[in-house]
């Protein structure tokens, strides 16, 4: 799974030559094979590495603050989202939804490498949401739909249908 | 900039140490573990760095990196890798081990999970030539790892002493003044106690089954908040619900429907019409949900409620489009109508649309009633004569009415506006006003000719109309779109509407000055409601000239609104014959297909006659269409979503609950409903169910069909939860009290299933009937439960014997859905091909034509996966052969022959894949 994701990420970054990957351990941590040296280990590290390879450092953030925010969401993806317990999914979606309320991308107004990676990580979750849940997490859904239509992001994943109109205009509370 | 930290938290240790080390200026504030600093996170987390920009960093590693970054100390790839390792590998293992040791006081083998990461670190450090992890000087990775491991070294039972290199490195980092200071700040000399305080506030790590501790079960986790639509029941509601439960069913069973149904004194007399589907085409799903299905749900509901109700509909058969279709198919217009009327009838039958009468407009009654209304309008001076400039196509030798001409909309510039109305802006157009008009048949530019016509004098009727509208809209249920569309029509001011046409296929205008002309369909078609009723019963006037006793509901899609709210009421008002006018106008928005429009010509979308070929039951179609019903806004049909809804809502929620309830009765109680001893919890459930039932009735009374469907699903969700919490399958094996509890839960559940069957009837009639017969529910229950505000009564008393229970729904598999999606998709690359194809094939069967995108010009091949597989193999083999020949420098002619073979295979493959064949690739030829 992570490997498909990395190959999609390479395409997103515009890297022409695909790298070789393997996995290690029970958690199937991705490893970027390298001819010289021990290889790059871990999804976040590889993503960061690839971004620099592609000479797109802006995708890691263009200021110290932005760089930290990007790293934070990358870490969030691998520590909170990946392998999260079922009961935590709602909390994650709720938090992301609040966070994204006033943002276009995870790091604010510019796309960063955290966006596609979070999109890949969230895909299976969003896929399973019912229409009313998608509406409940409206900001996440909007960001998600934006990502899946963003040039060169989606690749290996099927598109998730997102209704443009709200079906449930109001709930009773 | 401000850093928030808490005591005993190793992550705060990281941040403070880095802050000291880098010397970045920053305020530090000590807070409680539970302090919520980051506004967008539900759970408290620390440390948090509040950045000058207002952003929050809540990841300790990101904070450390940031501080290094701004102090220009920087970090390298290696430190990235260490930080990720710390967060993903080391931390989970550490948290788990520390929890066992520090919080639970266990000593046996707690370090097991830690062994692997610690020995990895040991090995890495032992190979290092530098004193620190990533460089000669201390880096961000050193601090982060040191702080993370600090508790492990603090707690001696984690066998850290054997790790020589790690210990050396750990001490080397630990003596740094920055680290010393941060330890003091975070642990305050309290050591393990401080750590314990921190750990106790953390959620139990994964892979561990601890008793819930009293300290921290966070405030936002209560189940009521996740189930957001839960109604909080009051004590009073609970008592009332319990009383209702014990009521006796006091209602005779549903009376047989006796035709003809006529209005009765003292009853609620409801007349329901669905917009008459036009006969020249097969209706698509949007048409079905838009009128006939929506009206059907409402009619079924009304009959359950005991209203005296008549639901009529029929095919609209006159007009230019029929004439055109007849010409295309080489039939007479009447033959076309007969053919399509039968098609429509069958489709609606399959969808279980329960009309009281489904008629048609090409009848003698239509002529009589339409001509009668015409004469009355004429006598009362509501018709005006005028010479009309009309478009005439010289090459087709006829006047181009309405849909025979297309052009640019004079109002909004939409290029495909029709001769009578623009689809884009919805305004009515006189055909001569169209810019760049074109005959739809021959594409020639028509000329303007004049002809004498009759107009309905709408301005003269306007005051009358407005008076009636005010009253109808304020007392009846008009959907918002219906109100808005009507209002905008009136605001623009009414103009005389031409009601005659130079055509043959229509109701003849009886006036001698206009012989040879027919009524315009929009004058004629709504009169169809009356004439169809007249064909149903001679006493049709009891419905249609009885506004005092009859409530009229019109169902339609939004494009039909003006004709039902303005034009037709004006005809009836002008006729001054005490006609029944619409009280409730229910208009839906449009249903799109997978984010695009249904299109017959492009083969996009599911049409009524194909739904049954999908193998998906009619009830499931009904359910999904109603679930999606475009109320308020447009909606989109999606295959994936349909499968999801079937599997999640029908199978796992509704079906699962009803099936379990019945199974428990069969399995644990020999098929007899057990005794109920209501506890507080059961009563609360009864109240919740009662509340949903009330919502259901309130919604359906207002024709909010989709909202009411949600109530049904909520009830079964409550039911599932109830069963899940009470575990009757376990309790049945327990003592007497437990067994009694299992009995109560089972009996309440199975009674809920009966209620659900009653509520489901309008939506899924077959499923509803199946549930009733599986549970052997008495026939009167449904009606009784839906009386008044709704009564959830115990309808299956203790001892009632149920029948055989079996699953109600089937899973829709992903492959099945993929296949269907492809079949009906009209996918982009094939669009052009199928369009061309659509024009070349004989117009024999529009349905099959549209169902499969057809590709090749002479051979029509559908995608054949088996053939594709064979061809791919053949191509690979042939490709190898060619390469070998080339490698051997074989003769050109020999290679050429093999290449030709290869190209032929490729061409076949394209055909087999259902794509249009492309010109042979040039590349192959050149070589």
Image (spheres, coloured by chain):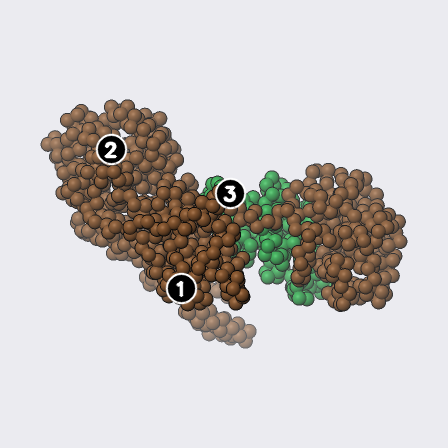
Chain colours: A green, B brown
Q: Both on one chain, marks 2 and 3?
A: yes
Q: SS of the residue at dot 2?
A: loop
**Mark 1 nearby-residue class (10 Å; few <14, some 14–19, many ≥20):** many
Looking at the image, which is closer to me, B834 or B96? B96
State which tag comes first along the sequence, 1 or 3.
3
State which tag comes first along the sequence, 1 or 2.
2
Circle 3 residue: B234
Task: Select label 2 or label 3 by which is in front.
Answer: 3
Q: Label 1 is found on which chain of the structure? A: B
**Mark 3 nearby-residue class (10 Å; few <14, some 14–19, many ≥20):** few
Q: Which mark is residue B692?
A: none
Circle 1 residue: B672
Distance in Å between CA atoms under marks 2 and 3: 41 Å
Q: Which mark is residue B548?
A: 2
Identity of the residue furthest to the front in this view:
B736
Identity of the residue furthest to the left in this view:
B512
- Whether residue B860 can be seen here: yes
Distance in Å between CA atoms under marks 1 and 2: 50 Å
């Amino acid at each position: 799974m992570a490997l498909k994701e990395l190959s999609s990420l390479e395409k997103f970054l515009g890297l022409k030559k695909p790298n070789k990957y393997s996995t290690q351990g029970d958690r199937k941590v991705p490893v970027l094979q390298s001819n010289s040296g021990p290889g790059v280990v871990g999804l976040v590290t590889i993503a960061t590495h690839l971004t620099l390879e592609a000479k797109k450092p802006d995708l890691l953030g263009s200021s110290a603050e932005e760089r930290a925010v990007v790293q934070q969401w990358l870490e969030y993806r691998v520590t909170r989202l990946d392998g999260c317990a079922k009961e935590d999914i709602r909390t994650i979606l709720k938090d992301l939804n609040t966070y994204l309320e006033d943002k276009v991308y995870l790091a604010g107004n510019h796309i960063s490498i955290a966006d596609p990676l979070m999109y890949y990580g969230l895909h299976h979750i969003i896929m399973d949401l019912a229409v009313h849940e998608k509406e409940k997490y409206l900001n996440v859904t909007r960001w998600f739909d934006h990502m899946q239509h963003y040039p060169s992001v989606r690749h290996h994943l099927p598109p998730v249908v997102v209704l443009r109109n709200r079906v449930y205009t109001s709930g009773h509370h | 900039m401000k850093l928030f930290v808490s005591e005993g938290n190793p992550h705060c240790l990281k941040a403070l140490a880095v802050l000291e080390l880098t010397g970045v200026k920053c305020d530090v504030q000590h807070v409680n573990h539970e302090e919520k600093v980051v506004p967008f996170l539900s759970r408290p987390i620390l440390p948090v760095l509040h950045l000058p920009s207002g952003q929050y960093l809540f990841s300790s590693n990101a904070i450390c990196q940031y501080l290094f970054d701004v102090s220009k100390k920087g970090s390298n790839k290696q430190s990235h890798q260490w930080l990720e390792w710390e967060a993903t590998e080391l931390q989970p293992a550490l948290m788990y081990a520390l929890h066992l040791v520090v919080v639970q006081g266990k000593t046996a083998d707690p370090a097991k999970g830690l062994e692997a990461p610690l020995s990895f670190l040991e090995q890495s450090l032992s190979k290092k030539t530098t004193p620190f992890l990533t460089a000669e000087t201390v880096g961000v990775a050193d601090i982060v790892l040191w702080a993370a491991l600090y508790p492990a070294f603090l707690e001696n039972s984690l066998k850290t002493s054997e790790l020589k290199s790690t210990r050396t490195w750990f001490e080397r980092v630990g003596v740094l003044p920055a680290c010393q200071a941060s330890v003091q700040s975070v642990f305050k000399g309290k050591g393990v106690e401080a750590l314990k305080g921190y750990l106790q506030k953390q959620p139990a790590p994964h892979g561990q089954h601890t008793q819930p501790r009293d300290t921290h079960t966070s405030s936002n986790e209560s189940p009521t908040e996740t189930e957001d639509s839960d109604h909080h029941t009051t004590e009073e509601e609970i008592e009332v619900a319990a009383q209702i439960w014990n009521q006796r069913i006091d209602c005779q069973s549903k009376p047989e429907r006796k035709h003809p149904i006529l209005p009765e004194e003292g009853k609620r007399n409801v007349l329901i019409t669905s917009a008459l589907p036009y006969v020249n085409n097969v209706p698509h799903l949007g048409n079905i949900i838009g009128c006939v299905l929506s009206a059907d749900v409402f009619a079924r509901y009304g009959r359950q409620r005991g209203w005296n109700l008549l639901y009529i509909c029929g095919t609209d058969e006159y007009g230019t489009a029929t004439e055109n279709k007849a010409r295309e198919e080489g039939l007479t217009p009447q033959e076309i109508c007969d053919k399509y009327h039968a098609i429509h009838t069958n489709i609606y039958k399959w969808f279980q649309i329960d009309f009281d009468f489904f008629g048609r407009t090409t009848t003698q009654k239509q002529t009589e009633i339409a001509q009668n209304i015409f004469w009355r309008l004429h006598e009362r001076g509501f018709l005006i004569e005028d010479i009309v400039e009309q478009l005439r196509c010289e090459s087709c030798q006829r006047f181009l009415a309405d849909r025979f001409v297309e052009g640019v909309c004079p109002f909004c510039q939409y290029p495909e506006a029709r001769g009578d109305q623009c689809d884009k802006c919805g305004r009515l157009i006189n055909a001569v006003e169209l810019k760049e008009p074109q005959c739809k048949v021959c594409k020639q530019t028509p000329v303007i000719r004049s002809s004498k016509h009759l107009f309905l004098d709408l301005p003269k009727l306007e005051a009358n109309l407005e008076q009636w509208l005010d009253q109808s809209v304020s007392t009846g249920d008009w959907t918002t779109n219906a109100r808005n569309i009507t209002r905008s029509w009136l605001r623009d001011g009414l103009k005389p509407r031409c009601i005659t046409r130079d055509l043959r296929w229509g109701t003849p205008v009886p006036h001698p000055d206009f012989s040879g002309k027919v009524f315009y369909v929009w004058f004629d078609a709504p009169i169809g409601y009356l004439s169809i009723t007249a064909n149903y019963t001679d006493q049709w006037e009891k419905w249609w000239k009885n506004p005092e006793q009859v409530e009229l509901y019109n169902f339609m899609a939004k494009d039909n609104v003006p004709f039902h709210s303005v034009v037709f009421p004006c005809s009836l008002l002008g006729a001054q014959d005490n006609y029944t006018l619409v009280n409730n106008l229910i208009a839906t928005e449009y249903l799109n297909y997978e984010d695009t429009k249904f299109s017959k010509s492009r083969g996009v979308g599911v049409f009524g006659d194909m739904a049954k070929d999908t193998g998906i039951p009619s009830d499931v179609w009904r359910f999904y269409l109603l679930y999606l019903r475009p109320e308020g806004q447009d909606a989109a049909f999606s295959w994936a979503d349909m499968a999801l809804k079937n599997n999640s809502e029908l199978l796992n929620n509704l079906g699962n609950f009803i099936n379990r309830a019945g199974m428990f009765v069969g399995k644990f109680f020999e098929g007899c409903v057990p005794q109920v001893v209501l506890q507080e919890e059961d009563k609360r459930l009864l109240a919740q169910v009662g509340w949903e039932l009330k919502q259901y009735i309130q919604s359906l009374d207002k024709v909010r069909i989709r909202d009411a469907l949600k109530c049904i699903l909520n009830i079964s969700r409550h039911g599932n939860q109830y069963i899940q919490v009470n575990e009757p399958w376990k309790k049945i094996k327990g003592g007497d009290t437990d067994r009694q509890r299992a009995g109560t839960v089972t009996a309440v559940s199975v009674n809920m299933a009966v209620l659900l069957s009653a509520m489901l009837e309008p939506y899924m009639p077959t499923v509803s009937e199946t549930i009733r017969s599986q549970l052997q529910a008495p026939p009167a229950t449904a009606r009784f439960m839906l009386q008044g505000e709704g009564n959830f009564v115990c309808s299956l008393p203790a001892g009632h014997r149920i029948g055989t229970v079996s699953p109600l729904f089937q899973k829709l598999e992903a492959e099945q859905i993929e296949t269907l999606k492809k079949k009906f998709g009209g996918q982009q690359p094939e669009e052009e091909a199928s369009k061309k194809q659509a024009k070349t094939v004989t117009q024999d069967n529009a349905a099959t034509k549209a169902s499969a995108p057809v590709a090749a010009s002479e051979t029509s091949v559908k995608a054949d996966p088996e053939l594709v597989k064979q061809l791919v193999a053949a191509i690979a083999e042939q490709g190898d052969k060619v390469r070998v020949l080339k490698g051997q420098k074989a003769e050109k002619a020999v290679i050429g022959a093999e290449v030709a073979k290869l190209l032929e295979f490729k061409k076949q493959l394209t055909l087999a894949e259902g794509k249009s064949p492309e010109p042979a690739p040039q590349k192959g030829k050149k070589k």
